[in-house]
Image (spheres, grey):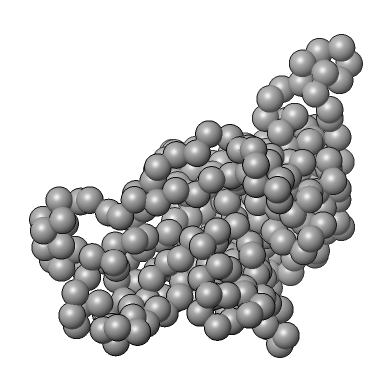
Amino acid sequence: MNTLTVPRKAKQAVGAITKLSNTSTGEVRVINVEYNQLDPLLRSSGFEDGDVDDSETGHSPYPGNTNQLLFKAKEYADYLAECQGQMPEFVNPKYKDDAKTQFKKPTRLECMMQDFPSMLKGKDAERVGFTAVPQNMVFSPVKNATEDGAKLQAKGTHPQCAASGEADQYFACRNILKSIGCVIEDGDEEEYKGVKVVFRPEIVVKAEAICCPAEYKEIFVNPEKVRISKNSSLVIKGNGKLRIESLDLDGALVIDCQEFATGTVTDVVVKNKGWKRVAVEEGQDGEKTNEVNAMRGYRMEKIETENITFQKGIADDCVIL
């Protein structure tokens, strides 16, 4: 079994991958320990400071569990047949404050898939590991209310709220394009409901167009000739065969290469007013704000957009605007 992990701040509300040793049997296993149990476990095991950040890396020595798990199918099936899929039970109460006298929400009984290593025996227990990757490329949960996210960010922890999840998605696309040679300007920091994020430039490549990072070069064939300003928004969609040979974007552009179509973008320069975010509050203007916008703290105002569409049966040098 292998777990995909990311760097984790000490006491961050993310399970941690640890290597535990049984002092009675000498058995060692790599397994997830939930964040509410990690600090007490460390303190009771001789680590007086508990879960603290390393002075050199700035992160906890115990990486965060993303619950992206890789199993060897046969052994996995064998153990499931033996245990009938039953995992150890676990409770993680959420309290309103540090006094821990009132629950923030109802507490539930859980059985967690990441506890699977606890079922392994003998040599199989030793065949468990983890792979560590940068968090901003693979892991950005949206699990907190915006108010709670702002408090976490103020403490130096990722907010894990709606705004940060969206911003991290754009960052991942920008980072991939930069890695292959595209010229991407970094946008300015913005703040909504106390959460600070960098959205721009917003780049969305739909799954039907590109499925994995290695495929980006199939569309961006001359990445050094692709320039995207910090005020831009780019959306690529459609499962046709698209090639972007050269593009200078300063504004908003949507490219749709439809099914069975082929399209080539060459020497295209787009400059327009683009899209911008407008802060919103629930109940603004005497109406109930859209729930999604209220949760994020903003709405998108699409002022001006350039659309390029490629359709089946039309020569790939023909662009429909």
Q: Using the image as rendered, state which of residue 183 and residue 81 is in the foreground.
A: 81
Q: Using the image as rendered, state which of residue 232 and residue 49 is in the foreground.
A: 49
* Residue 263 left/right relative to 274: left
* Residue 240 left/right relative to 139: left
Please tell me in which quadrant of the rendered image residue 157 appears.
bottom right
Percent x, y of residue 160: 65, 51
Residue at horizontal 46 percent and vertical 71 percent from the top: 17
How many numbered circles does the render carry?
Answer: 0
Q: Is residue 144 visible?
A: no
* Residue 97 left/right relative to 262: right
Residue at horizontal 35 percent and vertical 72 percent from the top: 2
Percent x, y of residue 224: 68, 73
* Residue 98 left/right relative to 127: right
The quadrant of the picture occupied by the N terminus is bottom left
Please tell me in which quadrant of the rendered image residue 123 appears.
bottom left
**Location of residue 50 with respect to 241 vertically, above or below:** below
Residue at horizontal 40 percent and vertical 78 percent from the top: 20
Please tell me in which quadrant of the rendered image residue 176 appears.
bottom right
The quadrant of the picture occupied by the C terminus is top right
Q: Using the image as rendered, state which of residue 265 and residue 57 is in the foreground.
A: 57
**Location of residue 11 with respect to 286 vertically, above or below:** below
**Location of residue 82 with respect to 300 vertically, above or below:** below
Residue at horizontal 45 percent and vertical 75 percent from the top: 18
Q: Using the image as rendered, state which of residue 300 and residue 55 is in the foreground.
A: 55
Q: Is residue 41 visible?
A: yes
